[in-house]
Amino acid sequence: MSTNPVPFWAVVPAAGAGRRMGSATPKQYLEIHGRAVLHHTVARLAAQPGLRGIVIAVDAADERFDALAADLPGPVHRVTGGAERADSVLAALDHLAGHAAADDWVLVHDAARPCLRTDDLDHLLTTLADEPVGGLLGIPVVDTVKHADTDGVVDATVDRSGLWRALTPQMFRLGPLRTALGEALAAGVPVTDEASAVEWAGHRPRMVEGSADNVKITRPEDLALAALYLGHQQETA
Ligand SMILES: Nc1ccn([C@@H]2O[C@H](COP(=O)(O)OP(=O)(O)OP(=O)(O)O)[C@@H](O)[C@H]2O)c(=O)n1
Ligand SMILES: C[C@](O)(CO)[C@H](O)COP(=O)(O)O
């Protein structure tokens, strides 16, 4: 842990329906070791001493959040998310703009990634603290990568050198991120993470290597994996 914590705001997109999970309960509210996935995720962020506040984007019809919020660690604020992840993040940034300065750091972290390691979060904050734009946690690709057509027939083996898988948190300054995301969405650019909007705006985010256990719970088997990782992290803490 750094001696001078880097101050930051957190945005947690939690307004997804979890369709690939196929559960009646959205995945952010499924329980692992007796706590909701969202609770684990928020607790990881709240453990950082530089945290100023957390804005969580939830669905307008979400009836679970308010009951959970009373128990969440950290200063938490609810906003209404949008149709896509990027819309939810933008709604949270719009709220933050009324409270934070344009050059304040914002870390956007998926609600569905409850296994974020404290040391990865600390490493991200300290590595990027003096960067003009920001960057994100990621993992270099270790598998051989194929490109295939829509029938699954391979047309190329892709050179994997320099390829990374993007994780969250993604850390950017509030003003440039909000502008980039707003303009990219208005232009119809596909935005699957914050970095893609920032890249579209002409900036070059920096990759910071994270850990493979920072999984995004997407399909049913990921829940068991996250439970395993969380249990192991608690045992070795
Ligand atoms: N309109 C949306 C869609 C997604 N998310 C959030 O973005 C994160 C990553 O998205 P993903 O894993 O795709 O979640 P879902 O959209 O819920 O899943 P699916 O695509 O399977 O429906 C999740 O924490 C999810 O709650 C959000 O805040 N608003
Ligand atoms: C932001 C993200 O988690 C980085 O890997 C990912 O892009 C989210 O994508 P999804 O299609 O919303 O799951």
Image: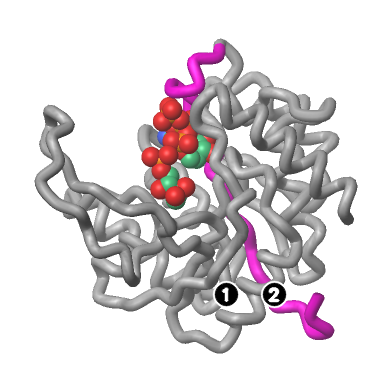
Q: Is residue 147 above or below residue 222?
A: below
Residue in view at x 80 percent, y 49 percent: 233
Residue 13 lies in the magenta-colored region: yes
Q: Which residue is mark 2?
A: 7
Q: Quadrant of the N terminus?
A: bottom right
Q: How many marks?
A: 2
Residue in view at x 29 percent, y 52 percent: 145
Residue in view at x 89 percent, y 47 percent: 235
Q: Percent from the top left, x then y, of residue 188?
A: 18, 48
Residues rendered magenta in the picture: 1-23
Q: Is residue 101 above or below residue 4?
A: above
Q: Is residue 203 left or right of residue 82?
A: left
In depth, the one of 172 and 225 nearer the eye is 225
Mark 2 lies on a secondary structure that is: loop
Mark 1 lies on a secondary structure that is: loop
The dot on residue 150 is none
Task: Name the amino acid type tagged 2.
Answer: Pro
Q: What distance separates the C-alpha of mark 2 from that of mark 1?
A: 8 Å
Q: Which residue is mark 1?
A: 104
In depth, the one of 23 and 7 nearer the eye is 23
Residue in view at x 49 percent, y 66 percent: 136
Q: Quadrant of residue 121?
A: bottom right
Badge 2 residue CB within 8 Å of ligand 2: no
- The answer to whether the residue labelled 2 contacts the one labelled 1, judged by CB atoms less than 8 Å apart, is yes
Mark 2 and mark 1 lie on one chain; the one further toward the N terminus is: 2
